[in-house]
Amino acid sequence: MTKLTKTLPTLLAAVFLATLLAAPNVRATEITGAITFSGGATFDTPGLKLAKTVTAWSNTRVVSADGDFGGIAPNTAVTFFAPWTFNPSTPTPGFWSVGGFTFDLSDSTIVLQNKNFLLITGTGTISGNGFDPTFGSWSFSTQAPKSDGVFSFSASSQAPDGGTTLALLTVALAGLELMRRKVRAA
């Protein structure tokens, strides 16, 4: 039996072990796509300029959905948490849910607020339907108290590789070098 034949099982075992150790770093199945809602919002003040809280939501529906949200039909009812205090920013678990997805609002920022217009953006995590929790952004706008607002959620999957590809490439190159040395020595 040659030295290469004796070394090959050890080399294959090392490659297999390295692959097992790298497995936890495999990319997650994150949510991608966008979903847009519309509906009405009632505020804690008669005008938008001093509003701090949405006290009630009405007729909240899906306007459009794509990507992983694509199975949610337009006009599907959406459940929003109320009351929602946006000034100061208040984390809100279960902020909205529809079609098996739930969005947990982490924070929000008032971009513009005056007597005629309110624009708020926020970030949080969406989960559901067998996907890994995914970071995403959210925005809400309305032109007048008790008017229909337009709000949306979008997410994109940009999870890093975690070094798995580099680790496997390193193991493969080390294995080739070992084989080269063994063949040359034989």
Image (cartoon, grey):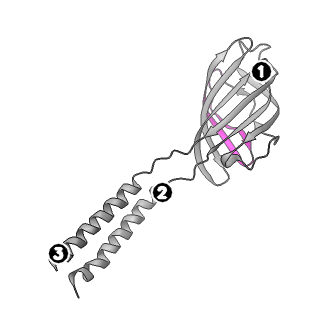
Q: Quadrant of the N terminus?
A: bottom left
Type of residue at label 1? Phe
The x and y percentages for residue 118 are 70, 19
Task: Report the Cα–Cα distance between label 1 and label 3.
Answer: 80 Å
22 vs 45, nearest the viewer: 22
Q: Earlier in the sequence, mark 1 or mark 3?
A: 1
Mark 2 burial class by Cα count in 10 Å: few <14, some 14-19, many 20+: some
Mark 3 burial class by Cα count in 10 Å: few <14, some 14-19, many 20+: few
Residue 184's disc number: 3
Q: How many marks?
A: 3
Residue 26's disc number: 2
Chain part drawn in magenta: 87-108
Of circles 2 and 3, the one toward us is 3
The x and y percentages for residue 170 are 31, 59
The residue that mark 1 highlights is: 43
Tell me which corner region of the image, top left, top right, bottom left or bottom right, holds residue 135.
top right
Type of residue at label 2? Val
Q: Residue at x 36, y 64 (%)?
A: 18
Within the magenta stretch, is there residue 32?
Answer: no
Q: Residue at x 65, y 17 (%)?
A: 112
Most frequent secondary structure within the magenta stretch? strand
Of circles 2 and 1, the one toward us is 2
The x and y percentages for residue 91 are 62, 32
